[in-house]
Image (cartoon, rainbow, N blue to C red):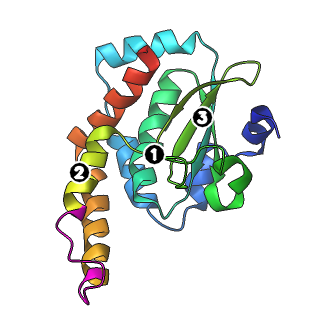
Amino acid sequence: MSLVAWFEKGMTFEEYRNSMQVNQQELSHVYEQLTFTAEDLSIFKEVANRNWRGIVLTADWCGDAALNVPVLQRMAEESNIELRFLIRDENLELMDQYLTNGKSRSIPIFVFIDQEGKETMVWGPRAPHVEDLVTSLKSTLPEADSPEFQDAQKNMFREFREKITSDPTIWRTVVNSVKEKLEA
């Protein structure tokens, strides 16, 4: 299936947000509270001239999506890019073309296409700073075979989700990461 067909299959942001069973409040908070600098807006204005569209592979249970989806949605709005959202597990044929490190179905993944439907840029699943944060948090977990591991891991991911969806300095690292790709 062509990328245009995948785009046309996707939900709008509002359809996706309204369908969410998990993390809807966190996603909405980031979406509503995110602000941009004058430099950001200048870059987004230039990107608007590219006439791109975007396909987002995501799922509502994903903590990274609760951060990245609203940030990139707001950036897309400022850049006149329409995003369409596909649930990862319902679209594995496309997901498997965008595996992280060639093996992981990590999300969210943002695939940008031009007017002809050719891929122009891919971003995701995390900004480097957020990846460093996860690595640091994981280093504090007990060994995987420890009886405490399951609860510790669950708490770590809960705390991670709360931090990334409430800290505007983390939101800024996502904006900057995407801007770097846009300017490359």
Residue beneath disc 3: 111
Discs 3, 1 touching: Cβ within 8 Å: no
138 sits to left or right of 17: left
Residues in magenta, as a range: 138-149
| x then y, percent, for residue 83 | 61, 35
Residue 183 seen in render: yes
Question: Residue at the location (21% across, 61% down)?
Answer: 137
Q: Secondary structure at mark 1?
A: loop
Q: Crowdedness of circle 2 by 10 Å Cα count: few (<14), some, many (20+)? A: some
- The answer to whether marks 1 and 2 mark residues whose Cβ atoms lie closer than 8 Å is no
Q: Position of residue 132 (x, y in %)?
A: 25, 47
The x, y position of residue 124, in whole percent, is: 47, 41
Q: Is residue 77 above or below residue 150?
A: above
Residue situated in front as seen by the camera: 135 or 62: 135
To which residue does mark 2 refer?
Answer: 133
Q: Is residue 126 magenta?
A: no
Q: CA distance from mark 2 to mark 3?
A: 24 Å
Is 161 displayed left or right of 69 in the figure?
A: left
Query: For the C terminus, which image quadrant?
Result: top left
Residue 125, numbered label: 1
Disc 1 marks a residue whose amino acid type is Pro
Residue type at tag 3: Val
Q: Residue 164 or 18: which is nearer the viewer?
A: 164
Q: Main secondary structure of the magenta part?
A: loop
Q: Which residue shows up at 55% across the image and 62% down it?
A: 20
